Image (cartoon, rainbow, N blue to C red):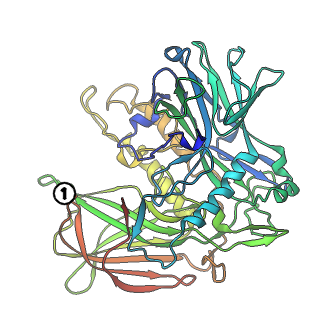
Amino acid sequence: MKVSQIIVKFLWVLLPSLVPFFAQAQMFGPGCKMSKDYSFNFFISPENKVKGMYGAMADRIPPTVISSCQGASGKTLAFGLGLKQPYLSSDTSDVSFDGLLRPEVCQIKNSPVANPQSFDEKLIQFKDQFKILRSCTYMELTHLDDKKIQFTPDQNYCHMHATPSGKVIAEGDFCYVRISSDLRIAISILLKDECLDPAFLKAHDISPRDLDALLQAFVVNDETSTTTENMIGSTKVRLSLMPNSHVLEVNQDLGPESALFPTTFSTDIHQGPIIIRDGSFGDDKKTFFDISLFLDTRSARKCRDGICVGPGDYQTPMAGEVEIYEVLASGKRQFLDSWYAGNPANPFAKAQWQGLFRLNQKVSEGLEIMDGKTYEVQFNFYSPYDDYLMLIKGYQQILIDLTLMNGTAGKDFIQPLNSLSGLLGLPQIPVLPQLGSTEIEEQLEKVRQLMQKLGQDQTFPPFYSQVCNSLLTQCQSMNATSKYLTLTTRFTTAGLNDDRSMKLTKIITKREARFVPSYNHSVPDLPQLVCQ
């Protein structure tokens, strides 16, 4: 049986509240627990001969720990580092441990572009990323109690061997370790020195790329098990093989020892689905906005010594300012609300990807969208870096504002913050306490401190010096204007759809920019994801 038959589908759907995601350990199946750590961000710079981790907490991130396996004694621990598949929706992920790309069952209807990304194109990109993952990384297992780890050296999908220090090196797609009642191991991801050598990369046809992976662990019956639903945990992993600065302009403000990302932004942005639902109850007026963007991060590449790379080979931050207007009978616009929109759970658009980027849900208090009236949703994009910071600071402010609330101890309760669900960068956040309890200040301060670490990493996103079209033939300096792109969508509300969302008719989409084609035209409907 091939490893491709391992059923390890991991559907990443934003959870409805903070609480489930921020326990100190997750337990999906019986018998073991896996620590929930920060995301691991790795980089390799062949030009500067350096490798390591980046991010505000890179020097303090612990390895992934698997423990509390008393209930699984005698069974087998299966684990692997898999590549996330580039699905058309930004908030779903399917993991591949064998490098095979599964055909997608969905498509985008009413696409705003004429060149949809083909499966073959995705496959080439996916193979390039998987080659980096397997050629440049390996895993190291350490028993935290200095006991011997029980394993079979040569497995069907993995080769493992013990070092003189007692650590175990694991390389391959899917690896197995026998579980004892006292098993307590740390799994570390390490980078190979070979990938610092440009000659090695060229010989193995490895080009600079940016990739997202997941370290996942399962409890299975034995080493022949290839199907399991007993996943005990998952940790996000990002690996960036840095480009040569003589090929692409990179951010060098932090010096050659750091990860150096391209400073050209080339993501093509269009309006995606706009879903509006009425949440009013009596005199309490409330409207829910679920808005997405249609993104195409593909870009042209530049080549040097047979190695080709482009700014689209690296993830890009995606956030912008949203404004809602009512269009009056006179033709004038009446302002209703505004906010910074992004996706703190997954704030970056995938590399060389085309799809729908889902933004955080907005609850607009005191606003009622009326049937039969005309409205406009306007997106303003000022700077990829600054827009990202504005988004993060907005979420920090939500937590700061919580301390100003008054309540009765043991009675009033802080409702789960839907807009913060699924923030993978914030581990070990306890359940938000009841208002008025003696621990509220201490607990909220812990949450705030973790939130503040977002947006303070000077390594990524980089400061972008220019924004270009996908061919890199037309560019605009980020210093030339305060705004690089505006999307405006006008529509009239006309009843409800089957899912109780508002039906939008008479849709007009407009895009204004100097570095990409502008347009202003009527469309039958906005882009939407349709699945079989």
- Above or below 491: residue 60: above
Which residue ends up furthest to the left in the rendered image? 282
Q: Quadrant of the C terminus?
A: bottom left
Q: Which residue sits at x=69%, y=33%?
A: 188
Identify which residue, 90 or 348, lies in the foreground.
90
Relative horizontal placement of residue 257, taking residue 112 as reference (left or right): right
Residue under numbered circle 1: 285
- Check disc 1: other Cα within 10 Å, few if <14, some if 14-19, many if 20+: some
Which residue ends up furthest to the front in the rendered image? 1
Give the quadrant of residue 47: bottom right
Image location of residue 117, percent across then percent down: 53, 69
Q: Which residue sits at x=39%, y=45%?
A: 401
Give the quadrant of residue 145: top right
Image location of residue 337, percent across then percent down: 32, 66
Image location of residue 509, percent across then percent down: 37, 80
Give the quadrant of residue 81: top right
What kind of residue is marked 1? Answer: Lys
> Is there any visible trace of residue 53 in the rendered image?
no
Relative horizontal placement of residue 124, taking residue 382 as reference (left or right): right
